[in-house]
Amino acid sequence: MAHKTKRLWKYQPLKSSYDAVIIGGGLHGLATAYFLAKKHGLSNVAVIEKRYIGFGGAGRNTAIVRANQRTQENLPLYREALQLWPVLTKELDFNLMFHNCGNLNLFHSEAAMKAARLNTASGQFHGIKSHLIDAEECKRMVPALDISDRPRYPILGAMYHPPGGIVRHDAVVWGLAKGASKHGAHIHQGTEVTGIEVYKGKVAGVHTDKGKIKTPRVLNAAGAYSADISSRLLGAKLPISVLTIQAMVTQPLKPLLNHVVSSGAYHCYANQTLKGEIATGAHMDPWPNYTNETTAHYIKHQAEALTEFLPCLAGVKFMRIWGGLADMTPDMAPIIDGNEPVEGYYIDCGWGYFGFKSSTVTGKYMARYMAEGRCPEILKPFALSRFKEHRLMGETAALVNYTPDN
Ligand SMILES: Cc1cc2nc3c(=O)[nH]c(=O)nc-3n(C[C@H](O)[C@H](O)[C@H](O)COP(=O)(O)OP(=O)(O)OC[C@H]3O[C@@H](n4cnc5c(N)ncnc54)[C@H](O)[C@@H]3O)c2cc1C
């Protein structure tokens, strides 16, 4: 008897009217649709995705989750995000494969160690567990690390963040799509939003390449394309640059890395996947562009950096490399806002390379914002107005001083 596979989400015809339309079938769009339908009873919702769900950063990221961000505004969001993975695994009845292996951020200078002390203390203030360890302790935790004086930047110590780890990114996309669809949301792949209709200062609908939709609420969760959508369709500019990030995996190896290990000085992070591959990535191409192309230069850099602190990887082959886009704001914190520049228009973008770990919690609060019309306290610091009011956040410093760990 032929086995009948159950679809995770239903295919539905595009309706001419929805209570809310979400542009982008990435992590943030799907999470918002799920929470709108499940928690707020707003199930007449459509997620409009121009390619396929997970086409953007959602399906290209390296799946690292952690809560040890830097600023007071960001920490509560990331703390709650980390707590949500096991909850959602149950709620969605879908294994998101949260592997709580902990993150080890290596430091190679006294200055970096000092900055890490500040970060650790800020995190502890918010109940986020991290502590500093010395080089010998790093070696005990990850025996493959070279803690000798040989590397260009010898390891002085690390910040160990036990609650972090890895979550399977595809599983999050599929699980959220399953949950959103189960509670009534429609997911339209292969459909592009081409216009936003405004009537008397309020959102009235969207235009797509498959037809017009009436709606009083639109969420722009289009990742790297969000700034283009805002400026082209509404004339509202967002302070976002788009840059390519590349990542790759090696051939499968026997277990050797049981934590996520990263180094700001080398611009490199690595973890071992369940298949045994070493997944590695970190820095962005230094010029704005919209391509997912990969470069030989990057492969060379990554091989050199990895083998400096994990010399046992010398000679191991890279099997795959891919690129994705990061929507970067000047302070490396996202833009989350509503009713700006017109009523009913919401934005959730500018996540750079932090947008996987934060996706579900942001979806939870964005759904509340869209359903109730009031911005939840936790999202208020991320308003667009901070750029006009010179209230930039210090997340950039977190990267410079401490780690480019995704
Ligand atoms: C190589 C790489 C590694 C990364 N590693 C990590 C990591 O380890 N941890 C972490 O937290 N983050 C990481 N990130 C960042 C993370 O992937 C992104 O921040 C996150 O995916 C953003 O989610 P999103 O839902 O906002 O956007 P996306 O996932 O990019 O989704 C946006 C969607 O909108 C669609 N779209 C665009 N325009 C339109 C339109 N006009 N109509 C309809 N649909 C449209 C796109 O096709 C896309 O599917 C990484 C990113 C990359 C590229």
Image (cartoon, grey):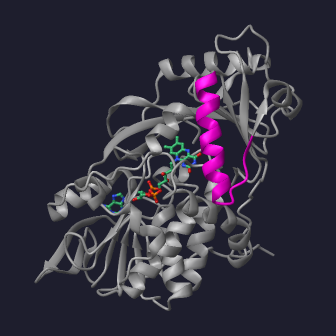
Determine the main secondary structure of the stretch shown in magenta: helix
Quarter where residue 289 is shown = top left
Magenta span contains residue 117: yes
Q: Give coordinates of residue 10: x percent, y percent.
A: 54, 79
Q: Is residue 270 above or below residue 341?
A: above
Quadrant into which the N terminus falls: bottom right
Q: Give coordinates of residue 34: x percent, y percent.
A: 53, 77
Magenta span contains residue 363: no
How many callouts does the rendering have?
0
Quarter where residue 221 is shown = bottom left
Q: Give coordinates of residue 90: x percent, y percent.
A: 74, 75
Q: Is residue 365 above or below residue 125?
A: below
The segment highlighted magenta reads 110-131
Q: Residue at x 18, y 63 (%)?
A: 233
Q: Is residue 128 above or below residue 269?
A: below
Q: Give coordinates of residue 171: x percent, y percent.
A: 65, 61
Q: Is residue 337 above or below residue 200?
A: above
